Image (tube, grey):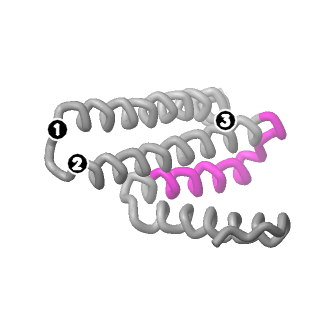
Amino acid sequence: MKDSRFVKGRMKSMVYAFNGAYKLVTTEHSVMVQFLIAVGVTIAGFFFDLTANEWMFQTLAIGLVLGIEGLNTAIEKICDFIHPDYHERIGFIKDIAAGAVFLAALSALAIGIIIYYPKFFC
């Protein structure tokens, strides 16, 4: 049953979103690894005293990778629900979703290199 009160409805949505993020981080191994990397680079950011712009880009990169990984996971779960056995078209869809995560991860890696290379080697 949908709650028509704005504030209460938004609060419920926030609870569902938090629960979804928690499930994602605690049940999906690839997200666990990416989350640990995010924690690591966040700690490194404090250690290396990142500028506001560096924090902004690092935070955006972390959010991009984790967000797209969440969408990839949702697509995979839907595909597995719809067609549990192997199917060429389902495999194609899942490959495209995984490719999106790969591209986001490459972008995050590039941002990480741009931010941290000078701190280690210059």
Q: Nearer the viewer, mark 3 or mark 1?
A: 1
Which residue in the structure is indicated by mark 3? 119
Q: Which mark is residue 2?
A: none
Residue 9 position, x and y percent, is: 76, 67
- The answer to whether residue 41 is magenta is yes
Q: Nearer the viewer, residue 50 or 20?
A: 20
Which residue in the structure is indicated by mark 2? 83
Magenta region, main secondary structure? helix
Q: From which residue to which does the magenta span run?
A: 34-53
Q: Quadrant of residue 90?
A: top left
Residue 41 position, x and y percent, is: 60, 49
Q: Nearer the viewer, residue 116 or 4?
A: 4
Asked if 25 appears above or below 42 in the picture, the reply is below
Distance from label 3 to label 1 (Cα)? 47 Å
Q: Are marks 3 and 2 in contact (CB under 8 Å)?
A: no
Q: Nearer the viewer, mark 3 or mark 2?
A: 2
What type is the residue that disc 3 sits on?
Lys
Q: Quadrant of residue 22?
A: bottom right
Q: Assign the C terminus to one quadrant of the image.
A: top right
Q: Which structural element holds mark 3?
A: helix
Which residue in the structure is indicated by mark 1? 87
- The answer to whether residue 16 is magenta is no
Q: Which structural element holds mark 2?
A: loop
Distance from label 1 to label 2 (Cα)? 7 Å
Q: Residue at x 22, y 48 (%)?
A: 83
Distance from label 3 to label 2 (Cα)? 48 Å
What type is the residue that disc 2 sits on?
His
